[in-house]
Amino acid sequence: MRGLTKTGLGACIISILSSLVLLSGCAQLGESKQQAVEHFIDTMVATHHVDKAELEALFTQVVVQDSVLQKIRKPAEAMPWYVYRTKLITDERIAEGVKFWSQHQDVLRRVEQDYGVPAQIIVAIIGVETSYGKYTGRYRVLDALATLAFHYPPRSAFFTKELEAFLLLSRAENMPPLDSKGSYAGAMGLGQFMPSSFIHYAVDFDHDGKKDIWHNSSDAIASIANYFVQHHWQVGQPIAMPVTVLGQQYKRIMNDQLKPDLRPSALESLDLKIIGAIDPDKKVKILEFKQQDGVEVWVGLDNFYCLTRYNHSPLYAMAVYQLSQIIVKKMIFNEE
């Protein structure tokens, strides 16, 4: 089956599956869950003109993944920073990042020129997400998204939309929906794009007629850069800066929001001093990172916030930033 078309499946497959509609993968569903699947199928048919029999047959092959549900309840971002950092910023990942940059330096240079996103940020993203393609995910994307859409109520709405997006991109890109592999959350390719991100931001950088973020490094690199551009990356601007803590006044304004909300001039009254120069007109966000013996305080700027649009975690954004800084020093200055 090459995507979802209006022509339906072959007669031999239909004859086998037509009497099993929603019974194989979805037989495990309770009545309300099965109704949710049927409602989803009806919506896809009405909204996107998908062949109903074909989609029903496809869902008979969905396998509910209990391990997906276990993993989404225990995300890595729940770790304290000092643990999270050691898992993502490793000697192996740094060395592989230097190697990846060396292998793809021409594409990275062109993408940086075209999009304005630093090469080291793109390299760090691919390193954090998939260790440069070593771990792009072992789950069938269809299984992962269907499991979360119909078995994980806290984020059912989000993953139902992603399931819809995945089926649409499978049709548009002429990809068999059962063949695509990804993470437990349905993220795909070298940069781990969710299906909706693929639709909005994936790029055919080498103009071969395909947006291949799985095997084509050029497309994956440019797609990541495009993602950041569309989320308002500020060319040439800093990302984050450490601060010296002179007291505890800053704690009274700490919150869970990530968007920069303070002028640098306000930091002194909060017993903070930025280590480095900063544009007084740029807003910053105070961020705490838990260490074993206390906390480390930084300020994030607009580009740090942009990094959190890729993964809504300050730990993730800081890991990408720090990994990128180490890799670029290795590349440019050959530091040991």
Image: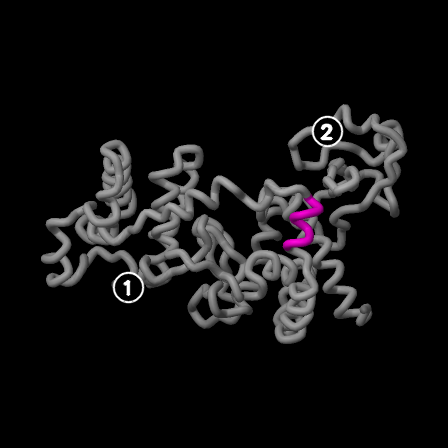
Question: Relative to 277, is 157 on the left or the right?
Answer: left
In the rendered image, residue 320, in percent from the top left (x then y), is placed at 67, 53
Q: What amino acid is found at the position of numbered circle 1 in the picture?
A: Arg
- The answer for how far apart the CA atoms under marks 2 and 1 are is 51 Å
> Is the residue marked by circle 2 packed among few (<14), some (14-19), or many (20+) residues within 10 Å?
few
In the rendered image, residue 20, in percent from the top left (x then y), is placed at 15, 49
The quarter of the picture where the N terminus appears is bottom left
In the foreground, 331 or 226 = 331
Question: Relative to 63, is 246 on the left or the right?
Answer: right
- For the record, the magenta segment spans 81-87
In the rendered image, residue 109, in percent from the top left (x then y), is placed at 67, 69
Q: Residue sitting at 64 percent across and 69 percent down?
A: 96
Residue carrying label 1 = 2
> Is the residue marked by circle 1 packed among few (<14), some (14-19), or many (20+) residues within 10 Å?
some
Q: Quadrant of residue 3?
A: bottom left
Q: Quadrant of residue 179?
A: bottom left
The residue positioned farthest toward the front in the image shown = 292
Residue carrying label 2 = 254
The quarter of the picture where the C terminus appears is bottom right
Query: Circle 2 — which element?
Result: loop
Q: What amino acid is found at the position of numbered circle 2 in the picture?
A: Met
Q: Residue sitting at 43 percent across and 39 percent down?
A: 158
Please report whichever mark, 2 or 1, sits nearer to the chain's N-terminal start: 1
